[in-house]
Amino acid sequence: MTHQDSSTQKLETASEQEEEEEYCCCWCCCCIAKGMQSIIDALTGGGNGGQKRREIKGTVVLMKKNVLEFNDFNASIVDRFDELFGRGVSLQLISSVHGDPQNGNKGKLGKAAYLENWIPTIAPLKAGETSYDVTFEWEEEELGIPGAFLIKNNHHSEFFLKSLTLQDVPGEGRIHFPCNSWVYPAKRYTKDRVFFTNKSYLPHETPLPLVKYREEELAALRGNGEGELQEWDRVYDYAYYNDLGDPDSGADKARPTLGGSAEYPYPRRGRTGRPPSKSDPNVESRVPLLMSLDIYVPRDERFGHLKLSDFLLNGLKAIVQVVKPELEALCSENRDEFDSFDNVLKLYDGGVKLPGGPTLDNLWKDVPLDIINAIFHTDGERILKYPLPEVIKESRTAWRTDEEFAREMLAALNPVVISLLREFPPRSKLDSKIYGNQDSSISEEHIRHHLNGLTVGEAIKTNKLFILDHHDTLMPYLRRINNNTASKTYATRTILYLQSDDTLKPLAIELSLPHPDGDKFGAINKVYTPPPADHKEGSLEDTIWQLAKAYVAVNDSGYHELITHFLHTHGVIEPFVIATNRQLSIIHPIYKLLHPHFRDTMNINALARQILINGGGLVELTLYPGKYSMEFSSSLYKYWNFTEQALPQDLKKRGMAVPDPESKHGLRLLIKDYPYAVDGLDIWSAIRNWVADYTSLYYKTDEAIRSDAELQSWWKELVEVGHGDKRDEPWWPKMQNRDELIESCTTMIWIASALHAATNFGQYTYSGYMPNRPTISRRFMPEEGTPEFEELRENPERAFLRTITARLQTLLGISLIELLSTHSSDEIYLGQRDTAEWTADLEAAAAFERFGKALTEVEERIVERNGEEQLRNRYGPVKIPYTLLFPTSEAGRTGKGIPNSITI
Ligand SMILES: *[C@@H]1O[C@H](CO)[C@@H](O)[C@H](O)[C@H]1NC(C)=O
Ligand SMILES: *[C@@H]1O[C@H](CO)[C@@H](O)[C@H](O)[C@H]1NC(C)=O
Ligand SMILES: CC(=O)N[C@H]1CO[C@H](CO)[C@@H](O)[C@@H]1O
Ligand SMILES: [Fe+2]
């Protein structure tokens, strides 16, 4: 502790004592005393030797705790009891002009003021905000213009402080302080809570009296790295994913720690500081599942809004606590199989009757019935009803066509893997010393007659061949998955041909297994081709081809959930959330730019670690890599490249676009009707223009970037700690100029908003009907001469359904994705903010308004394109328009809408 720090502390103690003396036993006494004082002041010309003393009127907006928590009856009783005694909330303005030399030149403090008209609410459980008047005494000459304020909560329970607004500040007019923070009783903090106005300052431009407050606030948010963090803590810190397993419950529940090793690299998550497990000191103990979903996240990361918290928490709780055991009981009672597609369709017509019974009845107690009813469309009868997924709304069979199979690689949930085929046959990048020959066995003979007379060489040269390549990523895991889980699956390669109408036609599917004698013998490949054009539906050839496509879909759906969705959006963003809050002050312009894109992300990720991606969680239960799911996700982080997450870079890398100055956005798409890319580039450009406009207001030169100490610490920590396992990658931007700042912030915003939306909100649309995108395959392609092969011939539907995801996993899986595909009613979409007063800078606000307009124009273009019949990939045989990158949405499961951040 420096000398200066200790003197500061002494002074603070002194000022606290002063306040104690002023403290009155009840509100009324205070009011009377204060009123008397102002009368005396008025009579004597002010209490301070003729100083010009003014009153500044202000309004505080806050929400009380019980408004958000229906069931927290204890809190509301204590709260009301407390109000009778009139303990207060005190506020002190802080000067932005005059420092106190005796207090480290920190801005001088005004006199404490108290909330007035704190009227006990008549209906204390009603949701919403309440406003309170507050009147500050302010010695204009001595204090100048306020730039921040201190607040102390002397109540027993916390409240959510939304904002303070001052009217008629001399020389300034209106001043707004956005707060959006939970303020706990004063004893929870070592320093009083401080809030700043909505002005932005680069670090060196901060008014001197505010500098110390700025630094202290960041230090408080960084914490000291020690101890278990508590509900009221606001500390942002890093940890490995060492909380997924539960070794105390047995060796089969243990999972490797992800992050911090070359073997299992992973992005960091938020630290909770929970004690280690008993069996392994390097593994964090878990919160017992049935007790609570209360995992520490910094207080203001916890859902501060009613709708999402109710909806998501209760929804997940209901799935794990009620639906899962019910379904397990049900599926063990009956056989765990669907026998026909009709049988599957009954899910959506009649629903699933849950067995109930005394043991199960008990489970329902914890989750309010109205919530279960609302979320699972039950009606008290314990029938789970699922809405009809869009993919089978128009036609019950269109999903099985080759055109739809291929189209979903361009316009459905996982449109980010398909790439241009540059060499034939496709070669593997796996190390042949370890994996032997992993090159493809697809030959010219397999595909030649589908190329409209072109040779394979000519088709490659004219950019007509594409590939969905799920070979190299999976092969190293395949032996373990097939041997140690219930899954029986393949690594896959699918070759597609681009037809003149811009649709893709699958020409060959290769299914590969590791060699039974060992990796070094290479892969065992089998190639399947579509049945002849005159084939009969349900014929043997047709069934085999449908199964081959199903294995591809299985592979793709695992990749989608674990890599595209969780790792590439949820997982990689969390370190940005942490680094930003630790290193960029809330008054830093880049903090203001990025903060909306971090809303709720730490919280949903904490829930995910608790019940989705944990050992034995819903992800392991419903996806084919089973207990290797997160390990597999970690193995793919090795290939993650931040700069490549920029959409234009991603498209170029996959060969889906080439630079072309003549084309819109400077890129020519090789498949013109590639809905994800077409709409995505419009959104990308809108974000980039906004980021460039906004940052240019604050950084006039590249030097300004280099000399911004907070910005430099932010980036350094993000790279070296947050993504520390990849700190030595050469591609990290060095954050030395404005271009790097613009490109990096655009990429971050893109990942958190559009990329996540494109891969998240169509989940039920396409996967709600499991045969379209099965998540598990339970047996291999039947070989001729086996009973399974006979079944394939005799009863193709049953054979298909016995191969893909079983009934229990299907029901659980679609319950989950239905929840995850839904927007809560208080979602905030790209181009929107929770308050118009997020910044005091008029130019920044105007730039933001232009961003909103640009997005509205993007919406119009999307609607137009969806109306153009020749753009066949936007609808496909299933007739689902491509809306996943349509910026706004209503609440509910709409298949559109780009929330600012990853909230679900
Ligand atoms: C296959 O599984 C068995 C039993 O789970 C195990 O003993 C064996 O080591 C596994 N082999 C491979 C190659 O993973
Ligand atoms: C990372 O991505 C950038 C941009 O696409 C690319 O230029 C670079 O080669 C990539 N680096 C690696 C190591 O993959
Ligand atoms: C989980 C998953 O989807 N696995 C694989 C699907 O196929 C590709 C290509 O080999 C792999 O990279 C994925 O890992
Ligand atoms: Fe998500």
Image (spheres, rainbow, N blue to C red):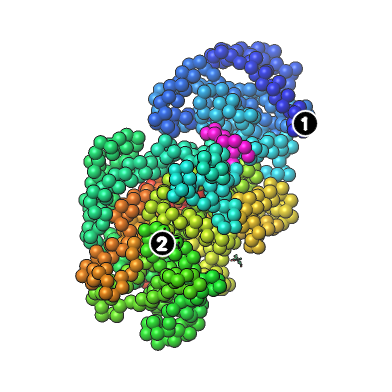
Q: Which amino acid does the dot numbered 1 rest on?
A: Gln
Pointers 1 and 2 in contact (C-beta within 8 Å): no
Res 4 label = 1
Q: Position of residue 519 (x, y in %)?
A: 49, 70
Q: Residue at x 71, y 31 (%)?
A: 107
Q: 168 above or below 646?
A: above
SS for dot 2: helix
Residue range in magenta is 225-236
Q: Which amino acid does the dot numbered 2 rest on?
A: Asn
- Please state which of the two labelled residues, at mark 1 or mark 2, is closer to the viewer: 2
| Res 365 → quadrant | top left
Tell me the residue that label 2 is attached to. Answer: 483
Q: Position of residue 513 (x, y in %)?
A: 42, 70
Mark 1 crowdedness (10 Å alpha carbons): few <14, some 14-19, many ≥20 = few
Residue 439 lies in magenta, yes or no?
no
Q: Position of residue 325 (x, y in %)?
A: 31, 44
Q: 734 above or below 161?
A: below
Mark 2 crowdedness (10 Å alpha carbons): few <14, some 14-19, many ≥20 = few
